[in-house]
Amino acid sequence: MSKLKILVVDDESRMRKLVKDFLMKQGYEVLEAGDGSEALDIFFDNQDIALIILDVMMPKLDGWQVCREIRSYSKVPVIMLTAKGEERDELQGFQIGADEYISKPFSPKILVARVEAILRRTSRSEEGEILECGGISIDKAAHVVTIDGEPVDLSFKEFELLTYFIENKGIALSRDKILNSVWNYDYFGDARTIDTHVKKLRSKMGEKGELIKTVWGMGYKFEA
């Protein structure tokens, strides 16, 4: 069985080596890029990349620009790495399609755990199951969502969130439960991350966004 391929993008060679060593110990094949321009060249030369770990502050092209360019072609999962810890930077990362956001300094073991969690969910989505509810259809294998027959363009995390809501329709879900189930690790960030994703998801769903109900003081519930 071929190894899953991960692209690590960071202008600090020491950081790249640290992340690469931990990933290779877990059996992944690792490609490296030292700037945004090189990252795009490698990405387009390797269509089988399973996940990208992407630093924000880099020469030539920063991580924001690289993520936007990749998102215009692919839904490959992207984890953003940055020394910045301000909320607006995290929100910007999610708005341009990043799936995870980790502030430096970080534990390499936590990073690997998040990588494995994302790749497990990606693997499960290939099982071929189709969910249908309230005019919404989710093809897990193709990673496609349609609403009343019209395709809806969702990020990886938005897709996972909507899938989780529909699989648990009618059940009131706390923010902590959503984080533990959709993110699938001990999340150390702010639970407002959930609110940010739900807001974007509702917007993309149009009128169907009203099916995601807010449970005040708790979280959310999908009702169709």
Image (tube, rainbow, N blue to C red):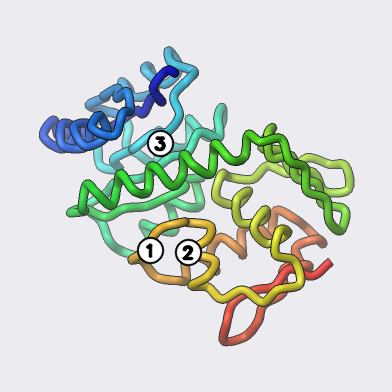
Q: Residue at x 29, y 25 (%)?
A: 30
Dot 1 or dot 2: first in sequence order is 2
Residue 15, percent from left and from top: 16, 38
Specify which label sits upstream in the sequence, 3 or 1.
Answer: 3
Count neighbours of disc 3 (C-alpha within 10 A) and say few if under 14, some if 14 to 19, many if 20 or more.
some
In the displayed structure, does residue 30 sit left or right of residue 178?
left
Q: Which mark is residue 180?
A: 2
Q: Residue furthest bottom?
A: 217
Q: Which residue in the protein does label 3 denote? A: 65
What's the residue type where badge 3 is placed? Gln
User: Marks 1 and 2, Cα distance to the nearest angstrom?
Assistant: 7 Å
SS for tag 2? helix
Amino acid at dot 2: Asn
**What residue is shown with label 1?**
187
Q: In this rendering, would 48 be left or right of 63?
A: right
Where does residue 215 sit, x and y in percent of width and height? 65, 81
Q: Are marks 1 and 2 in contact (CB under 8 Å)?
A: yes
Q: Residues within 10 Å of mark 2 (few under 14, many from 20)?
A: few
The amino acid type found where label 1 is placed reads: Tyr
Kindly report the distance in space between the C-alpha atoms of the residues bearing marks 2 and 3.
30 Å
- Residue 130 lies, with reference to residue 174, above or below; the image says above
Task: Determine the image quadrant of residue 134.
Answer: bottom right
